[in-house]
C-alpha cells in the first residue's frame, strides 16, 4: 500500500510520529505491540537496552513542559541514545536566527531525531516537512492540535485493562475545547474501532466539528452512564483567556468526578487522566487515588509507548539493512 | 537488631540516607569503608564503574545549588547510572501539581533514587515516607536541618588524615545556628566517639539545645586550643534575616581564622570548610590555601562518599539476590 | 623542539586549545588530519567511539551560547565522555565564590577538561594558567579575542573543498572589529601559508593592528575580486554599543553578499559563515542557500574538529603511557 502521509515512508512504515490522523489501524496496533515489549523493562534491574546506541535525540522544546520532557528523556536514555535538551526560546532564536536555520544547523550535526514541543498548532508538521530524509520528528504536543504519544499511552492503558476496543464505551470528560490530547484520543479510539466514543462537558468547552459518530453529552451523569473507560481532561485554566468559566469550586460542583458520580459508569470502569491533576477541580482525590484509577499506570506505560515510537521510527534503517541482506 | 528508623530496611541496611540521627556507629563505618573503595577512582584513566548501570537517579532540586548538584551528578555518572536533573520550582509545581503527585509520577516512570535538595527542614524525610518500597531517597540538604553527605565526607577526610576519632579534639567554628551541615557533623562525630566535640562562635550564632557533651566556646582562641581538627563554617549571610550581626570585616576581626590564630591549635591540625569560601570573612586566604588546609581534598572525597551512599542504598537488591543465591 | 607556549606540553603536544597564536603549522595540520578521521562518524549507524570513556568534560559557560554548547556537548558524547554543563553566572558565583575557587573545586572532583565560554578576552588563558597539570582547557570563545575551534573548522572546510591553502585568495567580509572568530581565522590562515588573506568592510568595522600581509579592502567588489573563499562574518549588533552604524537595511545595500556581487569572485568560490545567519543583513538567502554555500558543512565539520581537539588534548596521557611501555 503506497503511503501518502508525511508520517510514513515509502514502505508505509512510521517515519515521523506527528498525529493520529494519517496513520492507520495496523500501525497503531504495531505501536501498541512494540510498547508491550518495552513495558516490562522498568521492572528489570538494568533498565536499558542498546537499541539506539550512538543515535542522537534532540528534545526541541519551544515551551517548557518538565513532565513531557522527562518522559522522552528517560525513554531515549533507556534505549541508550545520546540525548540533548534544547530550550529554544532562551537560546538561538534570541540571536534572531530563524527556526529553519536552527533546524538545519542541528541536522548538520547529524542528529537523528527531534522531539518537538511547541505552543503553535502544526509546528511539528512544519518541522517534519523540512528535515533531512534520515531525520525523524516526534510531536511532543503542539498548541491545541495534537499530543499523539499521550493518546497512544491512553490506548495502551485501555488495551492492558480491557483487552480490546470494539465493545467499549469510552467517555472523555471536561475541557475538550482546550485539550491538545482530546483530539488525538478521539482520532485514535475511532481508528481502533472503539464501540462508542463520547465527549462530556459544558457547551462552552465542547468544540464544534467533532466527528459525527462521537456522542456529545452536556450532562455528566448521562455521559458516564455504563461507561467502561472514563478519561478525565485537565481544566486548562492557563489556556482560557477571557473565558466566562465559573470558579474552580463551581466547576467541581457540576463537573468534578466524584466516587458518587462514578456509580453511573460500569462497575469495572477505569478512570484515566493525562496529568498533572487539578485535585478538587476536575477530579476528587478519592477517585484519583482510588482503585479504579489507572492514572499512575498511564505514566509508566508512557515510557514504553515513547520507546516504541522512537525505536520504530529510528530503527527503520536497521530493518531495511536487514531486509536488503536477505 | 531490628531497625526502627525509616532509613534502614528490615535487615538494618541503608535504604535511605536522610540524616545522621537514626543511623549507628557500624553503618557510618561501613559508609566510610565503602567510600574508601571509590576514593581512588578519580585518579584512574577510566573513572567509571558499571555498578548502577540501567538505574535512574533523579536530582530533585527545590532550591538551586550547583555545587551539590554537580557532586551528585558526577557520582551517579561514575557509577554508570542515568541521571536526570529536575529543577522543581520552575517546572511542574508551576502547573499547580502537588509535591506528592510529582513524586508519584516520577516513581511511575520507574526511577530508582531521588536526591532531594529543599529549603524546608524535613522535606527529604517527608518524601522518603511516601516513596515506593524500591525507591531510595538521599538528602542533599534540607533547610537548617541536615546535610548528611557533607558530614560523612568530613568524617572521611578526618579519618584519612587522623586515622581514628576517639583521641581527637574537633572544633566546629562560626555560624553554627544557620548551618545545615553543623548539626549533621556534631551527630556524626559523636556517633564515632570523637574525643571532644566543640562548637565555637558568638552567642548569637550558637543555637540552644546542643548535646550536653558538646563543649561551647565563645572565645576563638580558647576554642581552638590544642584542637586536632578545625571545621570552619560558612557565614550564611543569605539566611540571616534582620540579624544584628556586624559587618563582614568586623566579623573577620574577631572570628576569622588566620595563621596567627591557628597557632592555638595542635601543630598538625587540619583545617576544613564545606565551601564555598567567604575569603576574608570566616577564613583568611593564607589559611584556606595553606598546607594545613584539606578543603579541596574534602571536595574529592565528597564524590567517593556520595558514590558509597548511592551504591549502598541502590545495591541492596543485588546483595539480597546474591545472598539468596547461596 | 621545546615548547614555550602554555598550550603545549613539554613534548610540544597540544595540552590546551586556547588560541591559534602560539601553535604552529604542524599542529594545525595534525588537528585537521585528526578531524578527518572523525568526519565520517556522523554518517555511521553508531555515532560513538569509546576514546574518552570515563573522562569528565565540563562545559563552563559564563555567557550563554546554545549553538557552541551543543557542538561541544555532542562532540564529547560521541567520544563517550561524561559531560556536565555548568552555567556559571546563575550558580556558584552568585554565592560570592571566586572564579579560582570554583575552578579548584571542579578540579578536585577530578574533571579532565573545561570548555570555557566567557565574555571577557583572555578568560580561557587565565583559567588554563591555573588548572592542575592533568586538566585541559579549550577556549569556546572569549570576548572579542579568540574562537579557535571555529577557525579550525573553517580551515577544515576550506581544505576539504580546495585541498590546500597556498594558492588561495580568502576574503573575510564584514564586521571584523567585533568578531571573535576573525582574529583566529586570520592567524590560522597565515600559519597555513594561505596565498592571500583579505579583510573587507567599512572603515568603522576594520580594526587597527592587522598583520602587514593582510590586505584591507573598503569596497566589497574589489575585496571579492577573484576570491576562492569568501568568509562572511555575522554583524554583531549586540556588541556594538553606541555605534554610528546605519540600519540593517542600509548595511545590506552596501555590504550584503548577493548572487550578483558574488560574480566578482572566482566561479568555483565557496561561501562560508560562522552562523547564526542574519539573512538580509550580511548575506542574502539566495547566497546562503545557494550551491556555493558550504555553511551547513561547516557545522558538520565543527563536530569533527571539536572531537579532534578534545581527543588530542585528553589522549596525550594514553600516548605517553604507550611510549613509556616501549
Image (cartoon, coloured by chain):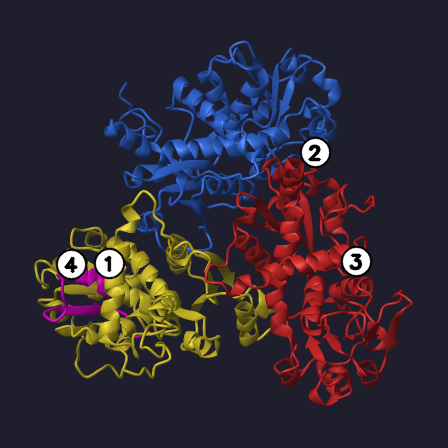
Chain colours: A blue, B red, C yellow
- Farthest residue to the right: give it: B212
**Gap between marks 4 and 1, in whole Å?**
13 Å
Tag 2 residue? A279
Which chain is mark 2 on? Answer: A
Asked if both marks, 2 and 3, belong to the same chain, the answer given is no
Q: Which residue is mark 3?
A: B25
* A105 up-or-down from B216: above or below: above
Mark 2 vs 4: CB contact within 8 A: no
Label 1, secondary structure: give it: helix
Q: Which numbered tag is attached to residue C36?
A: 1
Q: Is residue C232 visible?
A: no
Q: Residue furthest bottom?
A: B260
Viewer-side label of 2, 4: 4
- Which residue lies under the disc numbered 4? C161
Q: Does the magenta-highlighted stretch encompass residue C174?
A: yes
Q: Are marks 4 and 3 in contact (CB under 8 Å)?
A: no
* Of pointers 4 and 1, the one earlier in the residue sequence: 1
Q: Residues within 10 Å of mark 3 (few under 14, many from 20)?
A: some
- Separation of residues labelled 2 and 4 (CA atoms): 62 Å
Q: Is residue C277 magenta?
A: no
> Which residue corresponds to the image point at 12% horizontal and 58% vertical from the top-left?
C260
Left or right? Give the position of A6 relative to A208. left
Q: Quadrant of the C terminus of chain A?
A: top left
Marks 3 and 1 sit apart, C-alpha to C-alpha, by 58 Å
Front: mark 1 or 2: 1
Compared with residue A197, is residue C316 higher up or lower down, i.e. above or below? Answer: below
Q: Mark 4 falls within which chain? A: C
Amino acid at each position: 500500500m503506497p503511503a501518502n502521509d508525511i508520517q510514513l515512508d515509502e514502505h508505509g512504515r512510521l517515519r515521523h510520529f506527528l498525529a493520529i490522523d494519517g496513520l492507520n489501524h495496523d500501525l497503531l496496533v504495531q505501536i501498541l505491540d512494540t510498547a508491550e515489549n518495552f513495558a516490562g523493562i522498568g521492572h528489570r534491574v538494568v533498565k536499558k537496552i542498546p537499541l539506539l546506541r550512538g543515535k542522537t535525540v534532540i528534545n526541541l522544546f519551544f515551551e517548557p513542559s518538565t513532565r513531557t520532557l522527562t518522559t522522552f528523556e528517560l525513554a531515549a536514555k533507556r534505549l541508550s541514545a545520546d540525548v540533548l535538551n534544547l530550550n529554544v526560546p532562551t537560546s538561538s532564536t534570541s540571536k534572531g536566527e530563524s527556526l529553519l536555520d536552527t533546524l538545519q544547523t542541528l541536522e548538520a550535526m547529524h542528529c537523528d531525531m527531534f522531539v518537538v514541543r511547541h505552543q503553535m498548532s502544526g509546528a511539528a508538521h512544519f518541522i517534519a516537512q523540512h528535515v533531512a530524509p534520515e531525520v525523524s520528528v516526534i510531536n511532543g504536543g503542539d498548541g491545541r492540535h495534537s499530543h499523539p504519544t499521550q493518546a497512544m499511552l491512553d490506548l495502551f492503558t485501555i488495551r492492558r485493562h480491557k483487552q480490546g476496543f470494539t465493545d467499549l464505551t469510552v467517555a472523555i470528560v471536561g475541557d475538550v475545547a482546550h485539550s491538545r490530547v482530546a483530539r488525538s484520543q478521539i482520532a485514535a479510539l475511532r481508528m481502533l474501532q472503539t464501540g462508542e466514543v463520547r465527549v462530556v462537558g459544558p457547551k462552552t468547552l465542547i468544540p464544534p466539528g467533532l466527528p459525527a459518530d462521537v456522542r456529545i453529552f452536556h450532562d455528566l451523569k448521562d455521559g458516564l452512564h455504563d461507561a467502561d473507560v472514563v478519561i478525565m481532561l485537565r481544566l486548562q485554566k492557563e489556556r482560557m483567556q477571557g473565558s466566562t468559566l465559573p470558579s474552580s469550586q463551581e466547576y467541581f460542583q457540576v463537573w468534578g468526578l466524584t466516587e458518587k458520580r462514578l456509580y453511573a459508569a460500569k462497575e469495572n470502569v477505569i478512570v484515566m487522566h493525562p496529568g498533572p491533576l487539578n485535585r478538587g477541580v476536575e477530579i476528587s482525590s478519592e477517585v484519583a487515588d482510588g482503585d479504579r484509577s489507572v492514572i499512575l499506570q498511564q505514566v509508566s506505560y508512557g515510557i514504553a509507548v515513547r520507546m516504541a515510537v522512537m525505536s520504530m521510527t529510528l530503527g527503520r534503517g536497521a530493518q531495511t539493512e536487514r531486509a536488503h541482506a536477505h
